[in-house]
Image (cartoon, rainbow, N blue to C red):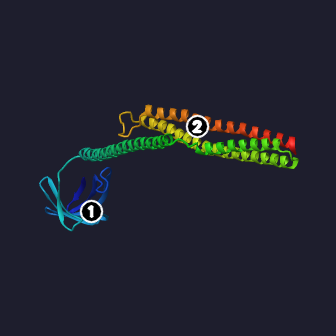
Amino acid sequence: MIQITRQAGTLSGTLDQTSLDSADPTTTTSTHAAFTGTMDGEAMTLSFPQGLGFVTNLSGTVSGSEMTLQVPQDDGSTASLTLAPASTDTYNRKVAEVQAKADANRAGRQAVAASAAAAASLQESRQQIAKAAEDVAQDAAVVRDGLAKPPSFSDFERDLTAAKQGLASAKTNAAMADREHDESSACSDAYSAESDAYSVESDSYSIDSDMSSLTSDIQALKDAATLLDRDLSAFKQAAAALPGYTPPNAPDAEHVKDLLDQVSVKTAAWKKKGASYQNEVAKLLKEARAVAAQAQKDHC
């Protein structure tokens, strides 16, 4: 909008301009500048003492009810700008339209950003659910592997067999002591029975060590089951946040429950079996000590 006053060949007035910001179309830029000028027939020149961007002078013509200005462009060319008579209210309405366009651009950009954020959030939620499902699958594989490879009780059997042999040897030496006519030889046999009892005690310690290893294996499987149960709960919680999505690798809750039940039952059975070896070797040790003690009492 140019508001201009003419006195003979002298001009003065103001220029107001509002436009979308070229760098950010969600905002507007406004310019207000005062000018002086000259008029010679239809030709006119407007001078801006404070400058108008990089322009200090504009030339133009007035023909009938139109004013045409030659406006320099950034690329060095010149563009014609034709203005027609109008009111300040008309200009203000046009400014409002420009502002509305900026607002619409901003709303559109916000909508695009919101849509992108929603899409990203959805993708992130799906990835979290898929990751939680993968964690459950990995945990279940560890538990299945543990159940498929039950602990070996061969060491228990070996140590128990050795303890039985030690007791048998203690009984044999005690019996030999009973048959000896020489007191010194009988006492020596009694000490041999005591040595056999110590061997049974060593076998008992070995079974205790076997039980310690078994307990560690059982605890490792129980820990794996605990992790499986926890990660299944985490999957359910993640999936509840996005009820319309089911990942391809979604875990079977019933299968997981069956695995957990198997862990509970089998580890209890393994522990019970290991304890039975401990109880049996304890009885053997008690008997071996008693045989050795009686032999020493009788012959030493």
Nearer the camera: disc 2 or disc 1: 2
Q: Nearer the viewer, residue 290 or 207?
A: 290
List x then y, in percent, for residue 209.
Answer: 66, 46
Q: How many marks?
A: 2
Which numbered marker is on residue 270? 2
Q: Which element type, helix, strand or loop, lies under badge 1?
A: strand
Q: Nearer the viewer, residue 156 or 221?
A: 156
**Residue 78's image quarter?**
bottom left
**Residue 277's image quarter?**
top right
Q: Residues within 10 Å of mark 2 (few under 14, many from 20)?
A: some
The residue positioned farthest toward the front in the image shown:
181
Inspect the image, locate mark 1, and give the three-letter code of the amino acid beneath it: Thr
Q: Tell me: residue 124, above or below residue 81.
A: above
**Which quadrant would the C terminus be assigned to in this image?**
top right
List x then y, in percent, for residue 215.
Answer: 62, 42
Inspect the image, locate mark 2, and give the three-letter code of the amino acid beneath it: Trp
